[in-house]
Image: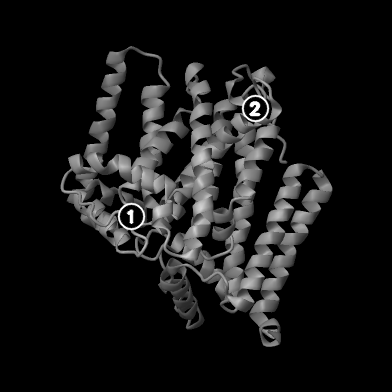
Amino acid sequence: MMLHILEPQFIGSLFVAVAILSFSVLLMLRYRNLFAILLLGFSIVAIFIVIFNYFINFIPQPRDAIERFIPWAMATVDNWKKGFVLQTLSLLDAKGIPAYTLFLAILFYFFDKSIIIASLFSTIFGLLCIYQLYQLSKEIYDIQTANLSAALLVFSPFFIYVSTVILRETITLFFLLWFFRLWFLNMRQPANKYRYLMLFSLVYMGLLRPLMLLVLIISITIDKTILTYKRNIVFKMTMIGMVILIFLSGIMYIESNPSLLNYRIFKGLAYSKIEAIQDRMEQSADAQSSYAPNVNFNSYKDIIKNMPILVIYFLGSPFPWQIKKFHQALALTDSAVLWFIYIIFFIEIKNFIKTKNKNIGLILVYLLIGICGSAVIQGNIAAAQRHRLIFTVVMLPFAAHRIGIWLSGKKAFKTPAILKQIPAVSRRISPI
């Protein structure tokens, strides 16, 4: 252990860990509220896990980190040290996921290829995810709901896990939550700065996970053309036809120029083909934790037929009959809590539907399309746990508000902020 402590990469990582903790402590001393305490507590737990794991490796790095992210980042660093700066992967490259690995390469370059630093990078974005969820919840509801939403995320075992290993989940989730928060800020007070930042977060999400870019573009189009306008059914059907036509035209253009798929930002369009969906499902189903080994897609009809059961497995795995390892047994508690969250989420959403308020239309469309789309290309428990995070966390503000109503014993926790249509009465959001 003494040799580990004396290593330069450990000493450098320790400085970063102390900086994170110091910031969290200052935040708590400055604001002295529940949210600041939650951030400090999460920082302490996450940093302890990262450093302790460095000595005894009780939480192995995931397969993607070992086989993809770490080797790609280290290869980039080796090129830099040889003077081959121009060989750095392009941010548009479809293979290397440089929108994530380039950050790792920079950290490896300055901190002697420290695995601790790379893990703390996930911790930093985990903290930023908690912050963005808190602010998003305040935009939709109120401070009480924001605190409860942040607490639900902070105490999530799986979120703690992805915030302490080398995965792109936390950085992807950060940009997603930031995008939705900017969306609501722009609805309340339209400004170009919000639109530019939304565009940036959307593009960067596309570089991290191309399928998310496709899902969000479709969701935005549906929200702006179908849900927003109060027109008759003929107008809406016309808009639906135009959206479908534009989407099909884009697919045909990509198919006629297959070289575009070499750019990562267009990679999501590959899943418009049955063959690509089937290939991805087969790759995912090869894992030991596969729950869909016999699913085959020969047509879109097969996708629709199998979608309900795949969605259930995607959202709820692991189930008791799927448990084969100890860590899967631990994951069972996480999935049990998620089913509770799903039920509460649907109960809360009924209130928005009754009010005929369309301000959360984008979130609902995103969840519907995203969950269905992800379910048909993920075929194992591990992949489902990771990929559903970008959907389940978005549900937390709504579930938290309903839980708050039950805990307070009142009819309404507070009037949802997003329902306040009069600018004069909409509250300003403070940084914390």
Q: On the image, which quarter does residue 187 sit in?
A: top right
| In-front residue for pair 15/326 | 326
Q: Considering only order in the chain, which callout, 2 or 1, is on the residue closer to the N terminus? A: 1
Residue at left 44%, top 75%? Answer: 71
Quarter of the view holding residue 22: bottom right
Residue 231: mark in rendering: none
- Report whether 355 appears left or right of 219: right
Badge 2: residue crowd in 10 Å (few <14, some 14–19, many ≥20) = some
**Which quadrant of the figure contains the N terminus?**
bottom right
Name the residue: 37% across, 52% down.
265
At label 1, counting other C-alpha atoms closer than 10 Å, the crowd grade (few under 14, some 14-19, many 20 or more) is many
Residue hosting label 1: 291
Secondary structure of the residue carrying numbered label 2: helix
Residue under numbered circle 2: 405
Q: Quadrant of the C terminus?
A: top right
Depicted 400 relative to depicted 188: above or below: below
Give the alpha-carbon distance from disc 1 to disc 2, as whole Å: 37 Å
Q: Residue farthest to the left?
A: 298
Place of residue 118 in the rendered image (x, y in percent of width and height, measured from the top left): 57, 68
- Expressed as whole percent of the image width and height from the top left, the position of residue 137 reads 61, 35
Residue 195 visible, this orientation: yes
Amino acid on which disc 2 is placed:
Ile
Q: Is residue 194 visible?
A: no
Q: Residue furthest bottom?
A: 3
Q: Is residue 314 left or right of residue 248?
A: right
